[in-house]
Amino acid sequence: MNSGNGTLIIACGALAHEVAALRRTNGWAVDVQCLPPELHNRPERIAPAVREQIHAHRAQYRKIFVAYGECGTGGALDKMLAEEGIERLPGAHCYEFYAGSQAFAALADAEPGTFYLTDFLTRHFERLVIQGLGIDRHPQLAEMYFHNYRKVVYLAQTRSNALTEEARRIAARLNLQFEEHFTGFGLLGERLAAIAPETIPTWQT
């Protein structure tokens, strides 16, 4: 049994900006601990990293919630969370809960070979994708990684001409078609609102 008070959200670093904005706007009483977004390049490390944070903070909080999708862990995240008795955001990944399950399914059906961008990934594409996957050091890897893609779909959380143009540049760099859909925060706010408690703690990073 937890001896602490309040709620902790253990969040993917790719959601940090959006979770912070929702928390501030709604006055949600949650603490947030973000994990490095680079974990998405090694999804087998996500479940162990989340478990480590659960164990590190469990005694301090009445409730812990995980702001991750399944995120390519092959069921490892859900298995671990079931063992720990912790809930997470529903859905396979952030693209699904930004766009909504039905809308995302329609996008995926229309073009299975789609590379998705969010605001976060657009801002950090060079670091997380080009550098993170070693394309900066071995440019020939780009063809291998993106050979089966046909389109870039930018799921925009904010209306920003600068981000739209950057997403267009990314699509052109990859020699892919470009499409943009404004999603806002999608279902993220709704899902997090369901677990927000009554007191206002501090923001953790």
Image (tube, rainbow, N blue to C red):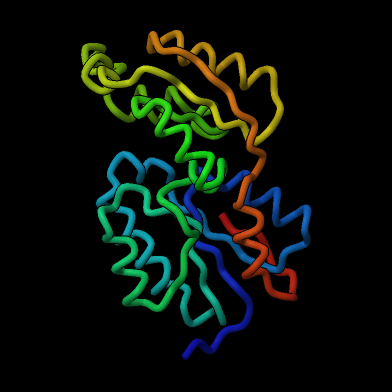
Residue at image position (69%, 74%) is 197
Q: Which picture quadrant has residue 30? A: bottom right
Q: Quadrant of the C terminus?
A: bottom right
1 and 116: which is toward the camera: 116
Indicate the position of residue 147 as horizontal and vertical percent values: 25, 17
Residue at image position (31%, 69%) is 80
78 and 50: which is toward the camera: 78
81 and 34: which is toward the camera: 81
Is 72 above or below relative to 53?
above
Is 36 above or below relative to 196?
above
Q: Is residue 116 left or right of residue 154?
A: left
Residue at image position (38%, 41%) is 38
Indicate the position of residue 113 as horizontal and vertical percent values: 34, 25
Indicate the position of residue 18 as horizontal and vertical percent values: 63, 46
Indicate the position of residue 185 as horizontal and vertical percent values: 64, 44
185 and 131: which is toward the camera: 185
Task: Report the label total.
Answer: 0
Residue at image position (71%, 28%) is 159
Q: Is residue 56 left or right of residue 188?
A: left
